[in-house]
C-alpha cells in the first residue's frame, strides 16, 4: 500500500484551487483526496520527456478544469500514471472507484498506441486519429490525452531538447485535429501555436514580432471599435457583450499561406466577438454591424444555420471598420460560445451543479451524433453533396489493426487476419497460412479488435483455400478480399489473361535454337517462336512488365503468348499447372512505350488528384486513365500511362511520393 503524505495546508490549497475550480462539497473533496494520494506516489518519477510526473499531472488536471470537465475526469487526469506506480495488490479502482480507474487505464492505452505507431504517425495521421477515437468508449479519455499533450508542449517550451520537433509534428498531425473535431478550442489553439513555435521558430518569431510591434495601436483600435459597436447595439435594443478576440499565430500563418496574403491583407488580425442572449439577437447584431461598417464581399459565414461538423455555431463577418481597416466580427449566443470554447467537454458541465437543463438533455443527442462525425474529414464541406457525406460509416463499424512495423490498417468490424493480409497486399493474402495477434497464435477466422498488432505467417508459394469463400466458415469479412480469392481461382481454372499491349521479342531457349534454324529479325517488336515465324504477344495485366524487367512468356490457349515479369506470382501459378508452356523472353530494341498502372493510396483532400497529375506531367508522362475511390477518408487511385523503361517509372513513383498526403505508391 502507498503511504499517504499530507501536503502542507498552504501548498495543498494552492494546488487544489485551479484543479477544483467551480467545484464544491464532495466533488471538491474528491479532488483534494486525489492530490494527497498522487504527490507521494509520483515523487522521484519522470516521464520519457524528462518532465517530472507530479508537475505534469498538476498541469494536465488544471487544463481539464479549464475546459470544464467533470470532477471524475479531473481526478482521472491527475491519476493518469498511478497504475504504473501502485504497489502489488493495490488498485486505483479500490481507492477511487471503477469509473476513475477505467479512465486512467484508457489514457495509458492511448499512450501505448502512440508508442506503437510513432514511427509512421505523419504518414497515417488520418487513420491514427480515427483509431484513437475508435478505441475509446469514453470521450473523456481523449480529452485527458489532449490535456497531457498540451502540458508536454509547455514543458518543451521551457526545456528544449531534440525530441520536441517530433512531438510537435505528431501534435499537428493528430492531436490538434482531434481537439478541433471535439471542438475544444482552448486546447486546439495552444497545441497548434506551441507546435508551430518548435517546427518553424523563425516564422513564428516574425509573425509574433509583427503582432507585438503594433500591439498598442491594435489594442487602442479594438477598444474604440468595441465602444462604438456596444453603443449601436444598445441604441438598437440588442443586449450584447462586445470584446476583442485573441489572435493565434498558427492560424494567422496558415491563412497567409493558403490565401497568399501579406500580414496587412488579413481580415482578422483585428477581431471582435459579440455575445448575445438568443439566436434572433445574433442576426439583429449582424444587421447593426453591417449598418455601422461596410461588409467585405464574400467574407460572411453563417455557421448557425449551417453548423460545422464539430457542432460549432457562430456568425462570421468581415467589415471595413474605423479608419477603413479590416475588422472581423464573430457573433454567437452564450451557449454557442460555451460550446465553441469547451466543445465536447461542455457536455459534463451540468454535473458541477447536479442540475440538467433542457439544453443539456438535447446535448446528449448531439454527443452521440458527434461520435460518428469525428472520423470525417475537416474539409468535408469541399467534398461532394450532403448525401455523400452522410454515408460515412460510424466508428463502431470500423476496427484499426496494426502491423509489426506500426502501419495502421482500417477494416470493417468482424474482419479476420485473412482480411488484414489482403488489405496489405494481394500476394500476402494468397499465401497467408497463419497469424499472430499481440504475439499469440490465433485461428485465421478470429475477429480482430482495434489496437491489436497482427503478424501474418505466409507460405513460400501457393494460393488461397476454397474454404475462405464459404461464408459460414467466417474466414473473410471484406468483399475486396473475397473478390481477390475468386479471381485467383478463375485464373487457375480458365487461364484467362489481360488485354493486348506492345510486344517484346521472345528468345527461345538454346535447345530450341538448335532444333529450328529458321529465324527472322523481330524488327517491329514482333516475336519469333520455334517452329513459327510470329505469334501474337500481350503484356500480362497482373504485373505489366516494362524494360528492363526480366520477363518470360506463357503460351495461352487461343490468345497467343502473355508476357510476365519473371518473378510474377501469377506466372508461377500458371507454370505449376503446365511448365511446358513457358518461354524465355527478352526485350527487343526500340520497342516503344509500355502501358503500366500506378496504384496510389493517400489521405483524401481537395486538390489531391490535381497535384498528382501535375507531378506526373512534370515527368512528361501522359496519363490515359484514372480510376479513383474514396473510403474512410482515404483515396485509392489507379493511374494508367505509358513509359519507355523502368527508370522513367521509378522517377514517376518518386515524384508522386513527394505529393502531400500520399502514403503508398506501387505498381498495379
Image: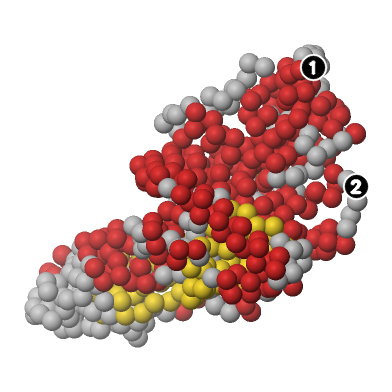
Q: Residue furthest bottom?
A: 558
211, above or below 603, in the image: above
The image quarter containing residue 361 is bottom right
Q: Earlier in the sequence, mark 2 or mark 1?
A: 1
Q: Which mark is residue 9?
A: 1
Q: Which residue: 46% across, 49% down?
A: 217
105, above or below 306, in the image: above
Q: Which residue is mark 2?
A: 354
Q: Which residue: 62% across, 51% down?
A: 185
In x, y percent, where is residue 148?
Answer: 62, 37
> Which element is circle 1 on?
helix
The image quarter containing residue 477 is bottom right
How many circles with numbers are drawn on the protein? 2
Residue 35 appears left or right of 206: right
Q: Is residue 448 visible?
A: no
Residue 16 appears left or right of 243: right
In x, y percent, where is residue 411?
Answer: 61, 60
Which quadrant of the rendered structure holds the N terminus? top right
The image quarter containing residue 418 is bottom right
Amino acid at each position: 500500500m502507498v503511504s499517504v503524505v499530507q501536503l502542507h495546508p498552504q501548498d495543498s490549497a494552492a494546488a487544489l484551487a485551479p484543479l477544483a475550480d467551480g467545484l464544491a462539497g464532495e466533488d471538491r473533496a474528491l479532488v483534494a483526496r486525489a492530490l494527497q494520494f498522487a504527490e507521494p506516489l509520483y515523487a522521484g518519477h519522470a516521464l520519457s520527456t524528462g518532465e517530472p510526473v507530479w508537475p505534469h499531472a498538476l498541469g494536465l488536471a488544471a487544463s481539464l478544469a479549464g475546459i470544464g470537465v467533470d470532477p471524475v475526469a479531473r481526478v482521472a487526469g491527475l491519476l493518469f500514471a498511478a497504475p504504473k506506480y501502485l504497489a502489488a495488490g493495490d488498485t486505483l479502482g479500490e481507492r477511487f472507484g471503477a469509473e476513475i480507474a477505467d479512465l486512467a487505464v484508457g489514457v495509458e492505452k492511448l499512450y501505448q498506441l502512440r508508442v506503437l505507431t510513432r514511427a509512421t504517425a505523419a504518414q497515417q495521421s488520418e487513420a491514427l486519429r480515427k483509431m484513437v477515437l475508435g478505441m475509446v468508449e469514453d470521450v473523456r479519455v481523449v480529452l485527458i490525452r489532449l490535456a497531457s499533450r498540451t502540458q508536454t508542449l509547455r514543458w518543451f517550451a521551457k526545456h528544449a531538447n531534440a525530441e520536441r520537433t517530433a512531438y510537435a509534428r505528431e501534435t499537428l498531425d493528430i492531436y490538434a485535429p482531434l481537439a478541433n473535431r471535439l471542438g475544444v478550442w482552448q486546447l486546439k489553439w495552444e497545441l497548434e501555436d506551441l507546435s508551430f513555435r518548435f517546427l518553424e521558430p523563425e516564422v513564428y518569431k516574425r509573425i509574433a514580432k509583427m503582432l507585438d510591434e503594433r500591439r498598442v495601436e491594435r489594442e487602442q483600435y479594438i477598444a474604440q471599435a468595441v465602444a462604438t459597436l456596444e453603443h449601436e447595439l444598445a441604441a438598437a435594443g440588442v443586449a450584447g457583450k462586445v470584446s476583442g478576440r485573441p489572435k493565434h499565430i498558427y492560424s494567422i500563418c496558415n491563412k497567409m499561406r493558403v490565401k497568399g496574403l501579406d500580414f496587412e491583407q488579413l481580415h482578422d488580425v483585428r477581431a471582435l466577438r459579440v455575445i448575445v442572449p438568443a439566436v434572433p439577437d445574433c442576426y439583429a447584431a449582424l444587421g447593426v454591424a453591417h449598418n455601422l461598417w461596410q461588409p467585405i464581399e464574400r467574407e460572411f459565414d453563417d455557421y448557425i444555420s449551417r453548423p460545422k461538423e464539430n457542432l460549432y455555431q457562430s456568425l462570421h463577418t468581415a467589415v471595413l471598420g474605423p479608419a477603413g481597416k479590416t475588422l472581423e466580427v464573430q457573433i454567437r449566443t452564450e451557449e454557442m460560445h460555451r460550446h465553441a470554447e469547451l466543445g465536447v467537454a461542455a457536455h459534463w458541465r451540468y454535473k458541477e451543479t447536479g442540475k440538467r437543463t433542457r439544453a443539456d438533455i438535447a446535448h446528449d443527442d448531439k454527443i452521440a451524433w458527434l461520435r460518428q462525425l469525428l472520423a470525417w474529414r475537416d474539409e468535408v464541406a469541399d467534398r461532394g453533396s450532403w448525401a455523400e457525406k452522410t454515408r460515412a460509416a460510424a466508428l463502431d463499424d470500423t476496427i484499426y489493426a496494426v502491423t509489426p512495423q506500426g502501419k495502421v490498417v482500417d477494416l470493417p468490424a468482424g474482419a479476420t487476419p485473412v482480411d488484414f493480409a489482403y488489405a496489405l497486399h494481394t500476394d500476402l493474402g494468397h499465401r497467408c497460412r497463419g497469424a499472430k495477434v499481440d504475439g499469440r497464435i490465433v485461428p485465421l477466422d478470429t475477429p480482430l479488435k482495434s489496437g491489436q498488432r497482427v503478424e501474418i505467417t505466409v507460405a513460400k508459394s501457393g494460393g488461397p483455400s476454397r474454404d475462405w469463400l464459404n461464408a459460414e466458415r467466417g474466414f473473410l469479412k471484406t468483399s475486396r478480399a473475397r473478390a481477390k480469392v475468386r479471381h485467383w481461382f478463375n485464373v487457375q481454372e480458365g487461364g484467362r489473361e489481360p488485354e493486348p499491349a506492345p510486344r517484346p521479342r521472345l528468345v527461345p531457349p538454346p535447345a530450341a535454337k538448335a532444333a529450328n534454324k529458321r529465324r527472322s529479325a523481330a524488327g517491329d517488336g514482333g516475336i519469333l517462336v520455334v517452329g513459327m515465324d510470329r505469334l501474337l504477344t500481350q503484356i500480362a495485366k497482373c504485373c505489366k512488365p516494362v524494360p528492363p524487367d526480366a520477363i518470360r512468356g506463357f503460351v495461352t490457349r487461343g490468345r497467343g503468348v502473355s508476357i510476365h515479369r519473371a518473378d510474377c506470382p501469377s506466372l508461377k501459378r500458371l507454370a505449376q499447372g503446365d511448365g511446358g508452356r513457358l518461354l524465355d523472353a527478352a526485350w527487343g530494341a526500340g520497342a516503344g512505350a509500355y502501358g503500366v498502372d500506378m496504384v496510389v493510396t493517400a489521405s483524401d483532400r481537395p486538390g489531391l488528384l490535381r497535384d498528382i497529375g501535375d507531378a506526373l506531367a512534370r515527368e512528361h508522362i501522359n496519363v490515359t486513365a484514372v480510376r479513383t475511390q474514396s473510403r474512410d477518408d482515404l483515396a485509392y487511385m489507379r493511374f494508367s500511362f505509358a513509359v519507355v523503361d523502368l527508370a522513367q517509372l521509378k522517377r514517376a513513383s518518386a515524384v508522386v511520393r513527394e505529393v502531400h498526403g500520399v502514403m503508398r505508391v506501387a505498381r498495379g
